[in-house]
Amino acid sequence: MKPKVLVTGGTGYIGSHTMLDLLENGCDVVCIDSCINSDTSCLEAIRQLSGVEVPFYQADLCDLGASERVFRDHPDISGVIHFAALKAVGESVEKPLLYFRNNVDSLINILDLSLRYGVKAFIFSSSCTVYGDVQKSPVDENTPWQEAASPYGRTKQIGEQIIRDTLQHTSMKSILLRYFNPAGAHPSGKMGESPINPPQNLVPVITETAIGKRESMTVFGTDYPTRDGSCIRDYIHVCDLAHAHTLALKHVFADRQLSQTEVFNLGIGNGLTVLEIIEAFQKQTGVSLSYTLGDRRAGDVMAIYSDHTKASKVLGWEPKMDINDIVSSAWTWEKNRSTAGGK
Ligand code: NAD
Ligand code: WQD
């Protein structure tokens, strides 16, 4: 029998790609999302690509009663992947309580329901942001945490701790996945990043500038002690990232996980500078980008990239795509959604 997986935040960027990967790898999927930062258009793309209509519940996970309906309708859910969260770092500084309420309350509710309804595997979207301002890279899972740079980052640190504390003395197992910089779009061009809030991340800012939604963009800082003066990050293709969730679930379902909670870094393991990303975009697409060299952005870490040896060894995960795949797929998606009159 196929395992049934509840994907929270499933109509969002990473959740939508993960739902497709799960369907392609022998899982049934149910989706819950409040649509605070997404719309439901990915469900049609997923139907076209997989032939499956995913059962969808529009509900806020902070509303325990509304969320419980999903479990009452699907008491056979055996895995939960919890993506649902607000993720804008700057907004979290302005509205910390919004972030604590949304990200922490929703986590408590979904954990509560998962335990009550006998879920076996709980996968949590964590972030490299838990490491804070690291002094050296690559970082592995044992790199000590620094102070979180934002309330958003703190919700991920708190979230990981809540899960560890809650799962002690239960039979549910959890995997905490620390993503580095997810980017790119599905190679079909039918699905990608399409948030309600204006994106602040580098790759969508590049594609939005290239298509003319923004007049120009700024490179935040060119005086860092890096090879070209701009910041270094670890950009991971969203489809590679999505597949890691499927592998993580299978790991738990196969009873291979011995400890209650396990943590994995998910990055490509190779740091690239902002200027290298811009260069890759221009080279891959032939589009010349309008950008200026600006001041550093407050709160930015100079360089961070991952050591993902553990995910490779334990989950058998290997990222297959590189920065050229990321910028090309992101550009195809940007052109498609703009032609379709999207946001
Ligand atoms: P996203 O905003 O595209 O998706 C998150 C989804 O959760 C959205 O569809 C939103 O409507 C939904 N949501 C938010 N609060 C909710 C609530 N209370 N109830 C129900 N639905 C709710 O973001 P994403 O990039 O797909 O991120 C997914 C997860 O990965 C998040 O937890 C995020 O913090 C984490 N993460 C993202 C990145 C990144 O750069 N994209 C990096 C590291 C970690
Ligand atoms: C990447 C690089 C910018 C925009 C954020 C969160 C982190 C995680 C991933 C969720 C930086 C530079 C960007 C622009 C630029 N998310 N940049 N001009 O800051 O590494 O990480 O997303 O957990 O928590 O903080 O990603 O895409 O914003 O920036 O020069 O217009 O691009 O300075 O060096 P970041 P990003």
Image (tube, rainbow, N blue to C red):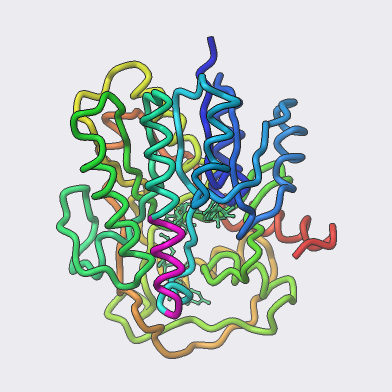
Residue at screen point 55% across, 44% down: 15
Q: Is residue 198 above or below residue 190?
A: below
Quadrant in the picture for the C terminus: bottom right
Picture coordinates of residue 244 (x, y %)?
43, 36
State yes or no: residue 16 in magenta. Answer: no
- In the picture, measured across the screen, residue 93 lies left or right of residue 139, that is right
Part of the protein shown in magenta = 94-104
Residue at screen point 59% across, 51% down: 12
Picture coordinates of residue 103 (x, y %)?
42, 57
| Occupied quadrant, residue 330 | bottom right
Compare residues 241 and 260 and report the one nearer the observer: 260
Q: Which residue is situated farthest in the bottom direction here?
A: 295
Count of marks, rendered view: 0
State yes or no: residue 101 in magenta. Answer: yes
Q: Is residue 259 above or below residue 233?
A: above
- In the picture, measured across the screen, residue 219 lies left or right of residue 286, that is left
Where ligand 2 lies, by image quadrant? bottom left
| Occupied quadrant, residue 206 | bottom right
Compare residues 117 and 196 and report the one nearer the observer: 117
Picture coordinates of residue 199 (x, y %)?
58, 69
Residue at screen point 65% across, 46% down: 58
